[in-house]
Image: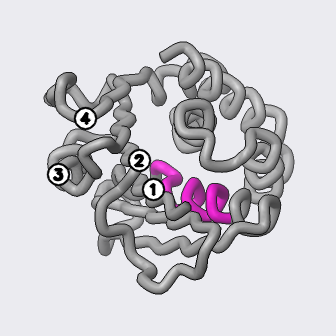
Amino acid sequence: MRYEVRLVGEGGQGLILGGVILAEAAGIYEGKNVIQSQIYGAAARGEISKSEVIISDDVIYYPKVRHADTFLALTQEAYDTYKDSVKEDGIIIIDSFYVKDYNPGWRKTYPLPLSKTAIKVVGKEIATNIVSLGAINAIIKVVGKESLKKAVLSRVPKGTEDANVKAFNAGYKLGVEV
């Protein structure tokens, strides 16, 4: 099994952390081979930001995502730039608030209120990355729910654990409901 995940949005949305958390869940808590890489623009906020995670039972010889099995787009620019790199049987998850122009019949596309859910549940849009991880986990199940939750708790700032668990659970519920 080799599974490729691409998380894309803009700087400041926490996608680099999201990729690190997913990689930690797969590698540390589930003992799989994993590679996580990241690209972000010159500016910390506002430029395109991309995190890629490859999870495999076998040795990973090439460390870059070629054709994503799962693609998360948190902005229209992210969707427009990377949608064509998703496998034919791949999954696209989009933030329905920011990505308005998409083809719902092309690939398995799940428009979810990711940022709105973050605001509703924890009062801050900054939790969209954790909501997204919950949704991804429910939809693709490439790592166990408890492994991913442990990885979230090991990486979020002290004092924010409860809010992040709420965000993760809300995202998971969104994913289950699709």
For the residues labelled 2 and 4, say whether their Cβ atoms are less than 8 Å apart. Answer: no
Secondary structure of residue under mark 1? strand
Identity of the residue furthest to the bottom in this view: 61
Name the front one of labels 4 and 1. Answer: 4
Task: Please rate how many residues cluster around mark 3, counting C-alpha atoms within 10 Å: few if below 14, some from 14 to 19, many from 20.
Answer: few
Magenta region includes residue 49 = no
Q: Read off the residue under disc 2.
A: 70
Whole-angstrom CA distance, mark 2 to mark 1, is 5 Å
Which residue occupies 57% across, 54% down?
18
Q: Read off the residue under disc 4.
A: 107
Whole-angstrom CA distance, mark 3 to mark 2, is 12 Å
Whole-angstrom CA distance, mark 4 to mark 1, is 15 Å
Instruction: Please state the horizontal and vertical placement of residue 45, each as a whole percent of the image.
Output: 38, 58
Whether residue 126 can be seen here:
no
Secondary structure of residue under mark 2? strand
- Judged left or right of residue 110, residue 34 is right
Which residue occupies 31% across, 74% down?
42
For the residues labelled 2 and 1, say whether their Cβ atoms are less than 8 Å apart. Answer: yes
Highlighted range, magenta: 13-23
Whole-angstrom CA distance, mark 4 to mark 3, is 10 Å
- Helix, strand or loop for the magenta stretch, by majority: helix
Secondary structure of residue under mark 4? loop
- Judged left or right of residue 103, residue 39 is right
Identity of the amino acid at label 3?
Asp
Instruction: Please state the horizontal and vertical placement of residue 127, each as a whole percent of the image.
Output: 59, 38
Identity of the amino acid at label 4?
Arg
Q: Read off the residue under disc 3.
A: 84
